[in-house]
Amino acid sequence: MKTAKIIGTSVEYPIGKILCIGRNYAEHIRELGNETPEAPVIFMKPASSVIYDGEEIVIPPYSGDCHHEAELALLIGRQGKDIPPERVMEHIAGFGVAIDLTLRDVQAELKKKGLPWEIAKGFDTACPLSPFVPADQVGDPQQLTIRLTVNGELRQDGSTAMMIHSIPAIVSHMSEIFTLEPGDVILTGTPAGVGPLRGGDRVVAEIPGVGTLRVDVKSS
Ligand code: ZN
């Protein structure tokens, strides 16, 4: 079973659902040539897609274009339904670093056909995830730098200040659709700079004040 640990405590939740928001940074929408959606685009990854710091990404054989998306992750610590934006922070137990791996070629094909994206977003190893820092130890979560390097080369360098939908807005909206439960994880979208990974790549995602996540891509 995959779990989410809170650093410096004995708290460890079995991971429930992983809710993700797509297209939440304007620059990233532009780089993919997408439309800016009026309502947030929401999709899910299964808990089985999680790998931890130091583990290995395995790109499935049905894709030739696996992209990295570095994202701020939220860990839900308290159940909630229809959470008003001003009460969202009471439900967040911690903040972490995630990489939303995306099989861009597979996703593009599915989108074209109007089909769901799961096999492009939810495969085994598709969600590298760091341990979580207690929420009260993180400064303003809307002022965090998000960086990702591949083999030491800077690919993504953004700020959570550039989100289109803020953390309270995302969580409040999601909680109108899904009851949020302790152990649920929310990925808040990726800044610009996404790009392909290859076998043997060393990927490091970092959010100063939150954590660093190091994963390698299995050599094919
Ligand atoms: Zn993403």
Image: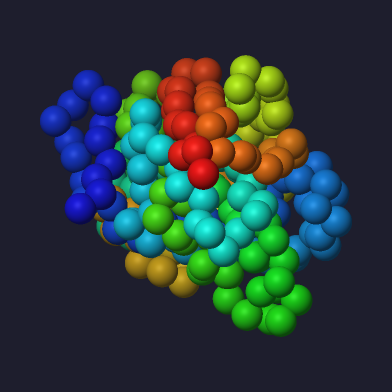
Where is 181 relative to 153, above or below? below
**Left or right: where 8 falls relative to 113:** left
Please report the residue visible at 71 percent of the width from the left and 71 percent of the height from the top: 109
Colour scheme in use: rainbow
Where is 180 relative to 75, above or below? below
**Left or right: where 10 falls relative to 213:** left
Q: Position of residue 124 (x, y in %)?
A: 40, 55
- Whether residue 85 is visible here, answered yes or no, is no
Q: Residue furthest toward the front?
A: 220
Q: Position of residue 87 (x, y in %)?
A: 42, 48
Please report the residue visible at 56 percent of the width from the left and 31 percent of the height from the top: 201
Please give the count of numbered marks on the rendered protein.
Answer: 0
- Whether residue 153 is visible here, answered yes or no, is yes
The answer to which of 142 and 204 lies nearer the viewer is: 204
The answer to which of 122 and 38 lies nearer the viewer is: 122
The answer to which of 22 and 164 lies nearer the viewer is: 22
Q: Position of residue 130 (x, y in %)?
A: 38, 33
Q: Quadrant of residue 146?
A: top right
Q: Quadrant of residue 21?
A: bottom right
Please report the residue visible at 17 percent of the width from the left and 36 percent of the height from the top: 11
**Left or right: where 198 falls relative to 176:** right
Please report the residue visible at 69 percent of the width from the left and 81 percent of the height from the top: 114
Q: Position of residue 2 (x, y in %)?
A: 25, 49
